[in-house]
Structure formats: C-alpha cells, structure tokens
Image (tube, grey):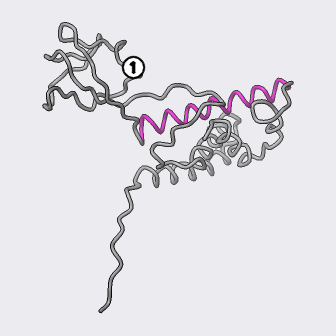
Amino acid sequence: MKVKEIIELALLFLDKEELLKYVPFGNESVLPELEDKEIKHLKKCFNLIYNEIATSYIPLLKTEKVVFENDVLPYSQISKNIVEVRKLVSNGKNISYTVEEDGIHANVKNASLTYNYLPEELDFDDDVFMFGGKLSERVLAYGIAMEFSLISGLYDDAEVWETRFYSGLKEAYSKKSEIRLPARRWI
C-alpha cells in the first residue's frame, strides 16, 4: 500500500474529498495555496503517526553484521537510525556492550547487531510497511485524521479520531498469532 492511498482514506474520514482531484491523488496539477498546504500537512501527519507507531508500539527491528574498530562501532556505520539496541551476538554468544555518545562499545571484532530503528520519512508514492500485517490502513488513516484535526484546531473531531486510532493500535499491538485447534472427531 502506498502513502497516498492511506492519505486518501484519511481524506474521506475528514470529509475533504475535494482534495482528491489534486496531484498526487488526482490529475489537477495546479494547486491553490490552501490546498497545497493541507496536502503537505497530511503527509507530515502520516510521517508523525508512522514514527510514533514504530518507536512506541510496534518497533521496527533490523539485524546486521557489524565490525568494531578499537572496540567501538560508530553510529554512522549502522545502516538505519538506531533507537534501541536489542542484542549483540558474536559466535552464538550474547556480548555485553555499552551505548555511548560516540557509538556502541564492546570487546569484540565482528558481531551481529539487532536493534530498533526509526523509519525514514516517506513520500506520497512510497510503499508503507504495515508492521508485518499487524496494522491496517484504517488505523493509520485514523491517526492522520487525528493529527490533522489537531493541527486544524478541530479538537472535538480530534478526540473522536484519537479514540479510534488508539483502540485500533491497541488491537494491533496486542495481536498474537491465531491459535487453531484441530476439529474434534466424534466416534
């Protein structure tokens, strides 16, 4: 699913279907100033919500091979914007480490680093990672509607969208794999 498809859903929730005729959603490329500002705000709202989910509720995990120089791994050598180190493993054993200002310190040369990271800012045509299927586009659209209503000063509307967003997020956050029991046979 693309960012613009989720924002389109949020526009329907917000009763702003008139924005769907403008680029990036429709064909009209000449945008009045107000509409252009609203569309840019909607993209910012999407990225705010996406970051909040990834940092506070359903973390994005990455594992990569790293090389320490003088027992230090500078943050610049890590491929993503790291939020939290989950574990450091070398030769099948967990390695103790410290997180410091200049990087991750550990008494090791080569290791496998698992960490949470911040998602990059997405644009309208970018594909959205839906957190392994845990999150639906509706929940993201509720979050966009909530943030947009807050920015617009529509606090009563924001409260409605906030309730829907956080209840959908709670359901996604607590979603476990489905357990199926075999059908019972009667003899």
Left or right of 175, for residue 4: right
Report the residue marked by disc 1. 79
Say which quarter of the image contains residue 178. Answer: bottom left
In terms of depth relative to the viewer, which is nearer, 109 or 171? 109
The residue positioned farthest toward the front in the image shown: 187
Q: Is residue 141 above or below residue 52?
A: below
Q: Main secondary structure of the magenta part?
A: helix
Q: Residues within 10 Å of mark 1 (few under 14, many from 20)?
A: few
Q: Residue at x 80, y 37 (%)?
A: 19
Q: Can residue 134 be found in the magenta stretch?
A: no
Q: Is residue 24 above or below residue 145?
A: above
**Quarter occupied by residue 77:** top left
Give left or right: position of 169 versus 39. Answer: left
Q: Residue at x 75, y 31 (%)?
A: 24
Q: Tag 1, which secondary structure?
A: loop
Q: Position of residue 67 (x, y in %)?
A: 24, 15
Q: Residue at x 81, y 32 (%)?
A: 22
* In-image side of 183 versus 88 (left or right): right
The C terminus lies in which quarter of the figure? bottom left
- The mark tally for this picture is 1
Residue closest to the eye, 53 or 78? 78
The amino acid type of the residue labelled 1 equals Ser
Residue 174's spot in the image, x, y percent?
Answer: 40, 53
Q: Is residue 56 magenta?
A: yes
Q: What residue is shown at x 59% (from left), y 47% (from top)?
A: 137
Camera-nearest residue between 7 and 128: 128
Front residue of 36 and 23: 23
Name the outermost residue toward the bottom.
Answer: 187
Q: Find residue 35 and report its horizontal and vertical position in percent.
A: 80, 30
Magenta region, residue range: 32-57
Q: Quadrant of the N terminus?
A: top right
Q: Is 117 situated above or below 147?
A: above
